């Protein structure tokens, strides 16, 4: 019986070890540290405990370094690449805040969108580089709802890390949650006032037919969005 119990304990550890060795050999990032940080410091409503992240800063910076040291390769799947860059964007935004904390608005920082904040070997990336040159070029408009720029009007920060296994579910859930969130979009029979994301990136959504895209997820169907039907973006920090 003792031997059997030991085998039951050893087998899961052996499997985890083999998985870790395989992942390391393939250069795939382990997002479990990021997952733990998000679980502990992000509410279900997407509000962030930035001081809590700062208390776990050693773990956070460890994860941030792992992103820099293990970039996507040709051997990665599309799902692994998307999860990597979406996690990277969100981690960069949080790092910019905690490195300059306290701040009330990400726009208080010096050129936050174009600052080459993230390095992979001899190349540096800004938030705009990741969003416009990588994520949007993947051709799925739902990526807009995976990323959070530390602001209240942004799609809420999911309190779990993205992985190849959950990325499709996350794309659907984050898109649906955002569109039906009355703090982000007001969609009723009498009033339509939607996020400026749909104005800024109009052509990403169903080739410019924003209403048709929204109707795929909205609980209330709309015919069209009036010219003045966009909400002013609230850049206030999404802090608990």
Image (tube, helix red, strand yellow):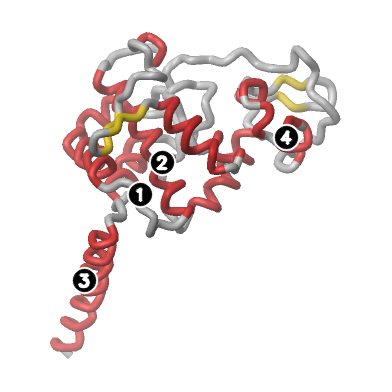
Pick whichever of labels 2 and 1 is earlier in the sequence.
Answer: 1
What residue is pinned by disc 4? 207
Relative to 38, is 57 on the left or the right?
left
Question: In terms of sequence position, does the residue under pointer 4 or pointer 2 come before the other?
Answer: 2
Q: Nearer the viewer, residue 213 or 77?
A: 77
- The reply to whether discs 4 and 3 touch (Cβ–Cβ < 8 Å) is no
The N terminus - image quarter: bottom left
Q: Quadrant of residue 206?
A: top right
Cβ atoms at labels 3 and 1 below 8 Å apart: no
- Does 72 sit above or below residue 109? below
Circle 2 is placed at which residue position? 85
Residue 171 vs 96, above or below: the answer is: below
The residue furthest left is: 2
Q: Nearer the viewer, mark 3 or mark 1?
A: 1
Distance, label 2 to label 3, CA atoms, is: 29 Å
Q: CA distance from mark 2 to mark 1?
A: 9 Å
Label 4 secondary element: helix
Report the Cα–Cα distance between label 4 and label 1: 29 Å
Q: Residue at x 37, y 9 (%)?
A: 108
Residue at numbered disc 1: 72
Residue 6 location (% of width, % of height): 16, 81
Give the structural element (helix, strand or loop) at label 1: loop
Residue at the far front: name it: 122
The CA distance from mark 4 to mark 3 is 49 Å
Image location of residue 84, percent across then percent down: 39, 45
**Which residue bears the numbered disc 3?**
13
Along the line of sight, the residue nearer the viewer: 108 or 51? 108
């Amino acid at each position: 019986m003792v031997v059997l119990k030991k085998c039951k304990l050893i087998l899961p550890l052996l499997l985890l070890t083999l998985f870790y060795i395989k992942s390391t050999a393939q250069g795939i990032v382990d997002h479990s540290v990021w997952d733990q940080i998000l679980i502990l410091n992000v509410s279900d409503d997407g509000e962030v405990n930035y001081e809590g992240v700062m208390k776990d800063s050693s773990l956070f910076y460890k994860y941030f370094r792992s992103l820099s040291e293990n970039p996507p390769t040709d051997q990665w799947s599309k799902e692994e690449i998307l999860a990597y860059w979406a996690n990277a964007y969100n981690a960069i935004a949080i790092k910019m805040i905690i490195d300059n904390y306290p701040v009330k608005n990400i726009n208080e920082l010096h050129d936050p969108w174009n600052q080459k904040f993230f390095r992979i070997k001899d190349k540096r990336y800004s938030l705009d580089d990741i969003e416009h040159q990588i994520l949007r070029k993947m051709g799925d408009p739902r990526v807009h709802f995976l990323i959070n720029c530390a602001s209240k009007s942004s799609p809420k920060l999911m309190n779990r890390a993205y992985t190849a296994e959950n990325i499709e579910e996350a794309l659907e859930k984050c898109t649906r949650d955002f569109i039906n969130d009355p703090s982000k979009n007001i969609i009723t029979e009498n009033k339509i006032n939607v996020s400026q994301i749909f104005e800024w990136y109009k052509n990403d959504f169903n080739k410019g037919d924003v209403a048709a895209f929204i109707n795929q997820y909205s609980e209330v169907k709309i015919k069209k969005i009036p010219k003045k039907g966009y909400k002013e973006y609230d850049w206030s920090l999404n802090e608990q």
